[in-house]
């Protein structure tokens, strides 16, 4: 049995995603018709569907032996902020148990895992005591074509095919990795990986100089024994804090116990001190340690790459950390511009899966019922589309409107006659007036665009350089130009409840919620 943990953070995170995250938690922002984290859940669900299509006696594939039984959302949002989503997700994926675990404070990407380790490893009520063999950990701001089945196969093949002298170093974690450019690599966690064995030999989070163009994607497959390593780190932090190391106190303790941690820890027994809440990072703390411990007792039995862009399989080693390198699409959702890029790729992935289902004549493979891409050039309702387009069933689109490519229209939205929309996201209950043009933009909830308006953003900000191999979206572009102080090229964003009056031109601008625009703007932030 497998579980999956999705790290969704809390209200203090996602500041670069504003103003879109002001009225809805960033993990619930809809991309291609689904909240961001539901794409993660969907990937876990489809992994289970692959199990049902693989014979149980097929011992060559671990996909047929394991599937995700429970998905745990881990963060520190209020329970009420996620209640409606959890109810909808549970109804859409009846075979998955989906729950939310609320952290007492921001505990870091590994601190929350350790705090809820008993819940993560607990068997399900109906599993007859079946143990958790491994669990996925997925950063909630990652968008990707998740190769979970290939990570699973690599992880368990390396664990189950070791000689006697390698059993002392089982594979504790398999990290989804990808390649980027030399210049962009410093914005990510960089891994030095043995190409023959896939062992992570060195790890540095956002180095100041070039280390490697193989970077961490923020998706992990972990063995239960990983908690032993985190426990060691936890104790080292406590010992360091107890010795008065103020740097470690500032780095690792939560905001609620920085001032009195030494006194509190001395009064508690050892067991309670180990179980206490502590900030621990998967990247800086756990991966860096495991990379240093990935020893030399490994055999070079890799089958090598086949040029297909898939994860290399067949490597057998006794290291404790592996890198599953893939060329599948991957991106981070740090900024609003990244949402347009992710929307395009998720729409394309759904088109591919729908075509695959048609070829295989599989009618009932469970995609959530609200998710239907309108891919034809003429919609049954009368309006025209180009390329991949998603329109919520409750949205109203005039027959003379033209949508696409890569457009998502949310629940209750209204698109009037003669409207042209491309490369954009129109959110819930938004209104686009007649004969208006919307390109490379996000129209917020309940926003209203009048007649004969032009709302346009910059296409360059939402795409990696197509002429550079392995180029990714740079996640830390400055908001303003350092030379002239003007807004850097960006998609245009209308916050919640914005009202754009008729015949207004809005170019490369960001509008905060509940503003009324009576004139045209270019390259500005309207406060």
Image (spheres, helix red, strand yellow):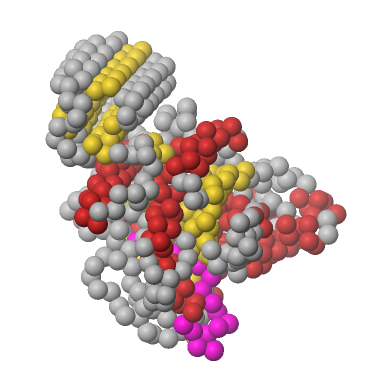
**Horizontal and vertical percent for residue 5?**
53, 53
| Observer-nearest of 57 and 166 | 57
Magenta extent: 161-178
122 within the magenta span:
no
| Observer-nearest of 465 and 379 | 379
On the question of residue 14 being in view, the answer is no
In this rendering, is residue 17 above or below 156? above
Residue at image point 25% right, 54% down: 361
| Observer-nearest of 505 and 422 | 422
Residue at image point 48% right, 37% down: 88
Residue at image point 58% right, 51% down: 108
Q: Quadrant of residue 247?
A: bottom right
In this rendering, is residue 525 above or below 100? above
In this rendering, is residue 426 above or below 316? above
For this orientation, the residue located farthest to the right is 267
In this rendering, is residue 431 above or below 81? above
On the question of residue 34 being in view, the answer is yes
Judge from the rendering whether residue 334 lies leftward or rightward of residue 251; answer left or right.
Answer: left
Residue at image point 18% right, 17% down: 417
**Horizontal and vertical percent for residue 257?**
73, 45
């Amino acid at each position: 049995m497998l579980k999956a943990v999705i790290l969704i953070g809390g209200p203090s995170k996602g500041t670069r995603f504003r103003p879109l995250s002001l009225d809805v938690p960033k993990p619930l922002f809809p991309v291609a018709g689904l909240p961001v984290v539901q794409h993660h859940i969907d990937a876990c669900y489809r992994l289970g569907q692959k199990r049902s299509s693989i014979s149980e006696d097929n011992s060559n594939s671990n996909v047929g032996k394991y599937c995700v039984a429970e998905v745990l959302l881990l963060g520190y949002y209020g329970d009420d902020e996620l209640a409606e989503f959890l109810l909808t997700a549970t109804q859409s994926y009846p075979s998955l148990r989906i729950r939310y675990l609320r952290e007492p404070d921001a505990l870091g990407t590994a601190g929350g895992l350790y705090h809820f380790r008993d819940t993560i490893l607990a068997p399900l009520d109906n599993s007859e005591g079946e143990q958790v063999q491994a669990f996925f950990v997925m950063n909630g701001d990652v968008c990707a074509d998740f190769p979970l089945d290939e990570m699973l196969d690599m992880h368990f093949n390396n664990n189950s095919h070791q000689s006697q002298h390698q059993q002392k170093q089982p594979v504790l974690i398999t990290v989804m990795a990808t390649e980027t450019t030399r210049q962009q690599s410093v914005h990510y966690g960089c891994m030095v990986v043995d190409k023959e064995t896939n062992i992570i030999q060195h790890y540095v989070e956002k180095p100041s100089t070039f280390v490697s163009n193989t970077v961490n994607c923020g998706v992990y497959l972990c063995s239960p024994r990983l908690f032993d390593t985190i426990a060691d780190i936890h104790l080292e932090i406590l010992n360091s804090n107890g010795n008065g190391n103020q740097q470690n106190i500032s780095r690792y303790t939560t905001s609620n116990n920085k001032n009195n941690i030494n006194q509190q820890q001395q009064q508690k027994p050892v067991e309670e001190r180990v179980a206490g809440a502590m900030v621990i990072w998967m990247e800086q703390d756990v991966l860096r340690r495991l990379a240093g411990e990935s020893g030399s007792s490994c055999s070079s039995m890799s089958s090598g790459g086949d040029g297909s862009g898939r994860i290399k399989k067949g490597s057998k080693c006794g290291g404790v950390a592996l890198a599953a390198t893939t060329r599948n699409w991957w991106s981070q959702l740090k900024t609003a511009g990244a949402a347009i890029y992710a929307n395009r790729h998720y729409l394309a992935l759904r088109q591919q899966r729908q075509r695959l289902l048609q070829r295989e004549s599989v009618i009932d493979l469970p995609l959530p019922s609200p998710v239907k891409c309108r891919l034809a050039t003429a919609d049954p309702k009368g309006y025209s589309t180009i390329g991949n387009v998603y329109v919520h069933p409750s949205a109203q689109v005039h027959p003379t409107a033209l949508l696409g490519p890569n457009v998502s229209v949310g629940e209750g939205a209204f698109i009037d006659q003669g409207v042209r929309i491309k490369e954009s996201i129109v959110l819930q209950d938004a209104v686009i007036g007649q004969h208006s043009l919307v390109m490379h933009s996000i129209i917020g909830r309940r926003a209203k665009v009048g007649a004969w308006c032009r709302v346009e953003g910059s296409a360059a900000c939402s795409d990696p350089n197509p002429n550079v191999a392995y180029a990714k979206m740079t996640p830390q572009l400055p908001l303003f130009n350092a030379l002239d102080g003007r807004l850097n090229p960006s998609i245009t964003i209308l916050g919640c409840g914005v009202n754009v009056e008729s015949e207004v031109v809005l170019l490369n601008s960001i509008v905060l919620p509940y503003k009324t625009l009576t004139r045209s703007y270019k390259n500005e932030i309207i406060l």
